[in-house]
Image (spheres, coloured by chain):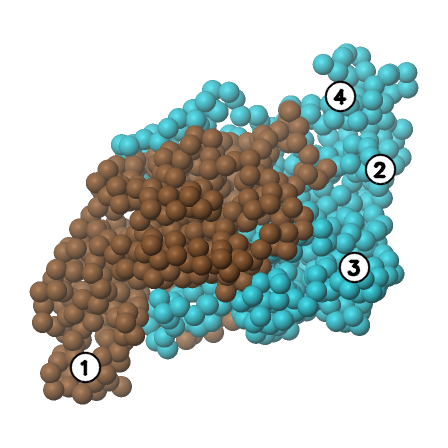
Chain colours: A brown, B cyan
Amino acid sequence: MDPEDWSEVRRLGHELLDDLIDQLSNVGERPAWTPVPPQVKARLEQPAARLPADFSDVLGELKRDILPYATGNIHPRWFGWVHGTGTVEGALAELVAGFMNCNVGGRDHAAVYVERQVIGWLADLFGFPADSSGLLVSGTSMATILALAVARESVAPGEMRRKGNSAAPGQLVTYASDGAHVSVRKALELLGLGGDSLRRVPADPVSGLDPRALEERIERDREAGLHPFCVVGTAGSVTTGAIDDLAALADICSRHGLWFHVDAAFGGALALSTRLAPRLAGIESADSLAFDLHKWLHVPYDAGCVLVRDPDLHRATFSADRDYLSRFERGTGAGDPWFTDFGPELSRGFRALKVWVTLRTHGLDRLAEMVEKNCEQAAWLARRIADSESFHLAAPTSLNVVCFQAEVPGGASIDSDEFNREILMRLQERGIAVPSSAEIDGRLCIRVAITNHRTRREDLEMLLDAIEEIRREIVDGTLA
Amino acid sequence: MDPEDWSEVRRLGHELLDDLIDQLSNVGERPAWTPVPPQVKARLEQPAARLPADFSDVLGELKRDILPYATGNIHPRWFGWVHGTGTVEGALAELVAGFMNCNVGGRDHAAVYVERQVIGWLADLFGFPADSSGLLVSGTSMATILALAVARESVAPGEMRRKGNSAAPGQLVTYASDGAHVSVRKALELLGLGGDSLRRVPADPVSGLDPRALEERIERDREAGLHPFCVVGTAGSVTTGAIDDLAALADICSRHGLWFHVDAAFGGALALSTRLAPRLAGIESADSLAFDLHKWLHVPYDAGCVLVRDPDLHRATFSADRDYLSRFERGTGAGDPWFTDFGPELSRGFRALKVWVTLRTHGLDRLAEMVEKNCEQAAWLARRIADSESFHLAAPTSLNVVCFQAEVPGGASIDSDEFNREILMRLQERGIAVPSSAEIDGRLCIRVAITNHRTRREDLEMLLDAIEEIRREIVDGTLA
């Protein structure tokens, strides 16, 4: 399968690299999002080919049908969901990882040491002990699954793995904020604990979960014969960026003997900034921590991390002795412990390299500056919206998320949800900008989440101007 | 975080690409594995930097400390565990994915259509219905977890997700061959069903699990009040490459109303070859299927796939309605269903691109040739071993795996396990070749698994010659 002529693939590779750099270096001049044309969709429904094709033709198709229609998060006016921007250095790291083609499940080779180093850096960033264990995974959803699996194992170590959930002394109950991410519930479902075992505790849009309400729920559940075992703190809720009082949660968990897990998917990045880190106070006391590197740390997709304070329990939850995976003191099969001992995946790519390159190149300080800048941009945008008669803030902005409605102009008989949805659609379809949406107090709002190192003040001004224009357009014309 | 000077990063990128192609195009001339030197390990323990670094310096470190110490599976004499070789085209696809930085959790952009197309190709390859659902994941371990979660949901749809495993009408029991991969047990552990709920059925090293013994176990467990719910067929066991009689298992599952999952991690690749595909007969009847693309399909790490016959049940197992993830008819938020509806991950990289590029460039026929070639190479090696007085076959070779012992020469008082382990270590440490090991009938054997498109007949001859030489060396010298 190797090319007969390496010089031809070399030439094509260089040409490809030039095209990619050309596109990325002027990404802001193109639309923030371009719908995939119907003829491209049709071509991407063709059956598999039995015969080989010229690589130059395959690259031609790729450049024509795939490259122009990316998700959009590399654009300076992408504000949708919570997506990071990536970097050119991270992208080049993926090239290296592709060539090296490492399996970082275990064994003894450089990729293993790179991943250990990166995990050490991240443990240190959050004030976790130096001997904490960790694993790079696809994102916080996976990280949460792993963390809650370790939490469950702590209920009856050894027994849980062998006998399953029925080995627990009672029905296991988990607590999280009303604003907690859907992945917490999904994790409990996958673990076979059932989504109903999650108790959602009332939360404030800025200060998060109410610790007193939490403690009452725990006590009530205990009295009802249930077995509370885990509290999930949220550091950065998706809708408003709320951060739970992690120190208070840590204290409650400690007093009640519960596992304390923190979902810091994007909020964890505050730890980079000496100015913002105090808002995470208490995170260093967590038993486990899940966060993303492809969001505010701008590592290319996908990359998340789980950290666990107790490495022995972590290993005991996942390690498996099989002769085929025997460890040796020497040779390729050395390197104990293997990453397969700390998670369910036996094959794992060299995800660590793009993290390593991103952190080595940009350094923690520059990443911190980007986080601070995005928070300042959100504050600026929120002020502009609060000061304008055309807009209405749907929730206070305390971090990097701004939720608002465009006011339906007086006299127009248009439903607010429909009005704002149409604005959102036109913004996206024209490639001007990509906010996403949220529902707050039963009303649809436009949601601008800024985790974007390419965004400048002008991009936010352009967004507001475009909304004003679309507002007038809709009122003057029709909704259809 | 964008470079001030794009021409400098462009120059560095081209230089990097040249280095990578230089290294890959002559990989066979370098050692198959090189231990990571102590000074490199020490450097990979440095703390994170606060300040940015010159990208050229970071690349310099990468080239010095990481690139020379890859896992080794890109080498023509890598025969360890079951690792694919990768291709230069797949590696370049990773570069594109890095630049595009897509999140393929959902929404409407080209990467989504590419992944759908690839899943369609794979469903078609295995004779699954055109409307089957599927998902690219990190590998078969993850794919098995997802498949068994869907299987569990089938026991009491809706109830299982909400109430957890206790909603099942009895203790859920799963069956698999004695030779089944450890990931099956790990999946059941993660799902909270407990590792002990796996019944291992006696198996033959070639024909796999004994269907009669399976049926007896199922009936016995039913009589004992347990709830058999799933059979996992193995298509290619790790130690001997055994393939279960999948048609017989499909029939048993159908008669007993059990879910039929197939672990075809590497054996699934036989489906590519018209000559070998009949050995998988019955796989088209599976309810779910898990297999790897980074093994015998030579997609760079990591890439596996799960296929599920019933797309509605698959979606019902994982989809979650949250306003923040609302779907629209238009704009970026269109594209329903989203891949997040079919698995636990909400953030997902553009893994599909390297699969697409590999299959488009090489075509199914060329991939099939590689599979056939590797099986022929294994058969040739097994014959050479069987014919030699220096070696002893530890199990019959029916696919691509050859397990054998080097005989301890007459007169030498060395334990066979110790002797073979030392041979293995010296092979690896000298970078001659990388087989791994297995335990068969309580004895350590050298295990050569060939899923390597770079391997030529000469590489296997070199392996045998080197073992002969090391054999004599050990007998002449000492074991220490």
Q: Position of residue B63 (x, y in %)?
A: 43, 30
Q: Are marks 4 and 3 on the same chain?
A: yes
* Chain to which the residue tagged by mark 3 belongs: B
Please give the chain letter of the residue carrying mark 4.
B
Q: Chain of mark 1?
A: A
Which residue is located at x 27 percent, y 86 percent?
A480
How far apart marks 1 and 4 lie (CA) works out to 81 Å
Q: Which residue is mark 2?
A: B441
Q: Position of residue B467 (x, y in %)?
A: 76, 26
In-front residue for pair A209/A136: A209
Disc 3: CA contacts within 10 A as few (<14), some (14-19) or many (>=20): some
Chain holding disc 2 = B
Read off the residue under disc 1: A474
Viewer-proximal residue among B163 and B406: B163
Residue B312 x/y as whole percent: 57, 74
Q: Say what amino acid the circle numbered 3 marks.
A: Arg
Q: Which residue carries the number 3 mark?
A: B279
Q: Amino acid at mark 2?
A: Asp
